[in-house]
Structures are given as C-alpha cells and as structure tokens.
Image (cartoon, helix red, strand yellow):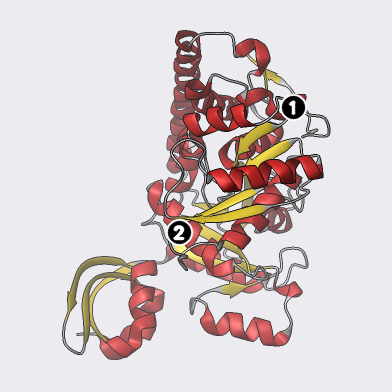
C-alpha cells in the first residue's frame, strides 16, 4: 500500500495511518493480502508519477523484496499517473488505486440488476480515460481477489476485461450512454413506486451510515429480515425495504442503503443516484454509527457531508450509536457525554436499547418544526452546533457576546434552547 499526505496534516478526516488501515480492510474485503506499506509527505503530487522519484525507487525495492503483485495507492490516480507508474514496474506488477479497489468490491457484491448496472456504469466511466490494463488487475493476478463473478450484457462483473480494452472510446461511450438510459428507466420505475407509496401515506425511514456500522444487522433485528450480514466493508449494496409495526399500530417502511466511506468515488455516487434517491425521499433518516470504532466521530462527519452532497441534508436525522455491547462502562459514559443529546445507544446484535429506539422512530416520524430565534452565548458552542445539525438555519448574526440564530428547530429539541429563546 502507498499512502501520501499532501500538505499539512488536518484533523477533519482520517490521518494517513488511519486511512491506510481502512485501505487494508478494503483490500481484505476484495480478497487481497497486504504485505507491506510505504508513506510519503508531499506539498503536491509529482506531475508524472504521483510520488517522488526517490520514493519510487524505494517502492520498487520493497515490492521486489516482498514479492508484491499489486501496488495499491490510497488515493485516486489520474490516468497519466497510472500509465507512467505502470511503465516503471514489471508487467506482472499491477498498479491499482483506491477507486478501482472500491469498484471491484462493489462488482463482487452487486446482486440485483440495478446494482450490476450501477457498478458497470461506474467501471466504464473510470475505464474510459484509462484504456490500458486497468480492469485486468485483479482478474489476472495470482492470489488476487477471488470473489464471485457474473455477467451483465456480456461484460464480467469484475470489469470489462482484456477484450474490452481493444474497443475504442466511441464504443465505450456508447455503452455508457446505454447504461445511463437503462438506469434512467430504473429511476423512473423507482419514482413511480415512490409515488404509489406516498399515496398509502406509509412513512419511510432510511438507514444510513458508514460502511460496516451495522445497518443490515439492525434491519434484520427490527424486522426479522434475512439480509446478508458480514463483518466487512460494503457487505450489502442494493437497498432492501421491510415493514416495521410501531407500538402505536402505525406501520413504517425501513430501507437499508449502501454504506458511505471516506474518498467515495464521485462516479460511484453518480452511478448510484437511483438508489441514493431512496435516502433523499425518506421521511426520517436513522444514522447508524459504530459507537465502538475509534474514528466514530470522523465517520459521522463523513456521512453527514455525503448526505448534504446527495440533497438529503434537510431530512430529520435520528442518531443511533450501535455496538455499545463492545464498550466498557467508562467508554460508554464518555460517548454519551460527547454525543448529540437525543442520540440513542444500542446493540443491534444483542437487541439492546430497542424499546427507546422504536419509540424515537415513532416520535421522529410525527415530529414537527417550530420557527424560533435564539441568542446563544459563545460558551454554548455545543448548542450552536446542535442547531446547525438538527435545525434549519435561515439567518445567523455574530455579535460581541454570542450568536443570534433564526430558523426552524425540531420541537423535541426546544427544551435545550428554552432559556435562550427571544
């Protein structure tokens, strides 16, 4: 694995070491054994080979010493970077970037026609400017990814393959156009389905979260569903919807969705637009967070930013910290002190905290918003963040002693702001 830190270290996302740990999990999910890693700090990527020339020589020696068959970069390489790096290595050594690896995992895990179409589209868009060996990487290497394969329109799920590399750009563009047309039909079908669903007035709750946070396990536990669950990244891709009957007698639809991740490829987000619209159309989002993960807060932020990106930032969110059975009392207490005041703490595996969760789902479905103006002193910074996260800010004014916010706030949160209401 090759990790590069561009510019100074920031604290908004994963550190370089943490990102490489996640990359190793992705590699394991794809069936690849990681035998070593190398890192470098750069002000900017090398225009030709991404890493520095000295680091490249070090990488060559390390790859030969460890008998590595794949060089896996933690960031997306430009087509030029990939071509130039491939020239530097023997043809038996493949150059793979994080985006290609994620696409390969998605190809392994797509089960429905929609999922297969989405992955195939993203693969072709990735391949188009890289008409080299890109999609024979994992299929040809000895000891590489060994996931199941299938075919969509004559194209192997693991990628277009060697024969596809011989077709010209025009043919690939035609395939992209055809796939986009087919996915547009899927989108139209989903729209018709959602319109029918809205006529029944059955509320929809979408489970969102970082990959491997436990969404599928939670859906199974709440609805006695039989969705595939595994302790790996992107175990399920295709949205699954099940009914949940609330204690009030009301029925809601719970929809499990694809997990998010840092550096999620843009083409993949675009290809999965039809699926992600299920999130944007939901009445309530259940944000499932792995409360036992050391980077739980970073993962929470990643999901929140992705929701904004797909147009779902205004939907009410119920924050649920999962896997609390893996925490000791001190760690759980610290998590509760730092979390959203309305957050819930559960174990989907052990079915802990379910009564409060189901009650909160019922409350979240019927909750309303109230228009308010509050003046928050700067020492109440946590409440400012809470308003931004849970409310809709219309106007914000910074004054000498605090900040005045005008907007809408969920009624169940008003008690936290009562003393600051104007």
Q: Position of residue 205 (x, y in %)?
A: 53, 54
Residue that lies at the very extreme toward the right in this rendered image: 143
Question: SS class of the residue under badge 1?
Answer: loop
Residue 322 left/right relative to 261 = right
Q: Position of residue 387 (x, y in %)?
A: 34, 73
Q: Is the residue 219 above or below the residue 134 in the image?
A: below
Q: Residues within 10 Å of mark 2 (few under 14, many from 20)?
A: many
- Residue 272: which numbered mark, if any? none
Query: Which picture quadrant has residue 84?
Result: top right
Q: Is the residue 53 above or below the residue 316 in the image?
A: above
Tell me the residue that label 2 is attached to: 304
Which of marks 2 and 1 precedes in the sequence? 1
Identify the image quadrant of the C terminus.
bottom left
Q: Position of residue 52 (x, y in %)?
A: 52, 46
Q: Nearer the viewer, residue 63 or 24?
A: 63
Q: Nearer the viewer, residue 373 or 158?
A: 158
**Is the C-beta separation of discs 1 and 2 under 8 Å?**
no
- Nearer the observer: mark 1 or 2; the answer is 1
Q: Residues within 10 Å of mark 1 (few under 14, many from 20)?
A: some
Tell me what residue is drawn at x 70 percent, y 24 percent.
Answer: 91
Q: Position of residue 49 (x, y in %)?
A: 52, 37
Residue 186 left/right relative to 331 = left
Tell me what residue is drawn at x 67 percent, y 18 percent.
Answer: 161
Query: Which picture quadrant has residue 313?
Result: bottom left
Tell me what residue is drawn at x 64 percent, y 34 percent.
Answer: 95
- Residue 92: which numbered mark, if any? 1
Residue 54 left/right relative to 324 = left
């Amino acid at each position: 694995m090759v990790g590069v830190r561009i510019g100074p270290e920031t604290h908004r996302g994963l550190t370089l070491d943490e990102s490489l740990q996640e990359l190793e999990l992705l590699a394991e999910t794809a069936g690849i054994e990681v035998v070593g890693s190398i890192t470098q700090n750069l002000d900017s990527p090398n225009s030709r080979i991404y890493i520095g020339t000295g680091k490249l020589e070090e990488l060559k020696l390390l790859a030969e010493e460890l008998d590595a068959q794949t060089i896996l970069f933690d960031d997306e390489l430009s087509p030029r970077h990939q071509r130039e790096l491939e020239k530097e290595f023997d043809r038996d050594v493949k150059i793979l970037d994080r985006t290609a690896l994620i696409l390969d995992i998605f190809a392994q895990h797509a089960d429905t026609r929609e999922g297969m179409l989405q992955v195939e589209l993203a693969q072709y868009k990735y391949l188009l400017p890289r008409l080299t060996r890109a999609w024979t990487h994992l299929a040809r290497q000895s000891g590489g990814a060994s996931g199941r394969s299938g075919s969509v329109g004559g194209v192997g799920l693991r990628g277009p393959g060697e024969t596809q590399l011989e077709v010209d750009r025009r043919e690939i563009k035609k395939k992209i156009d055809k796939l986009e047309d087919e996915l547009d039909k899927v989108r139209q079908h989903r729209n018709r389905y959602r319109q029918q669903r809205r006529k029944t007035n059955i509320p929809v709750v979408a489970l969102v979260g970082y990959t491997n946070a436990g969404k599928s396990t939670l859906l199974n536990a709440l609805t006695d569903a039989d969705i595939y669950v595994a302790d790996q990244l992107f175990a399920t891709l295709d949205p699954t919807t099940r009914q949940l009957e609330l204690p009030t007698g009301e029925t809601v639809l719970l929809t499990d969705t694809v997990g998010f991740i840092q550096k999620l490829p843009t083409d993949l987000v675009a290809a999965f637009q039809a699926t992600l619209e299920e999130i944007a159309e939901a009445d309530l989002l259940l944000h499932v967070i792995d409360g036992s993960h050391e980077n739980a807060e970073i993962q929470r932020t990643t999901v929140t930013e992705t929701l904004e990106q797909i147009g779902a930032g205004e939907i009410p969110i119920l924050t649920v910290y999962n896997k609390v059975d893996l925490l000791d009392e001190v760690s759980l207490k610290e998590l509760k002190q730092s979390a959203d005041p309305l957050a819930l703490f559960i174990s989907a595996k052990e079915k802990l905290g379910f009564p409060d969760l189901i009650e909160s789902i019922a409350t979240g479905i019927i909750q309303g918003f109230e228009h308010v103006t509050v003046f928050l002193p700067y020492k109440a910074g946590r409440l400012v963040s809470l308003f931004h996260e849970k409310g809709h800010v219309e106007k914000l004014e910074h004054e000498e002693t605090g900040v005045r916010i005008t907007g809408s706030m969920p009624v169940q949160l008003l008690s936290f702001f009562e003393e600051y209401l104007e």
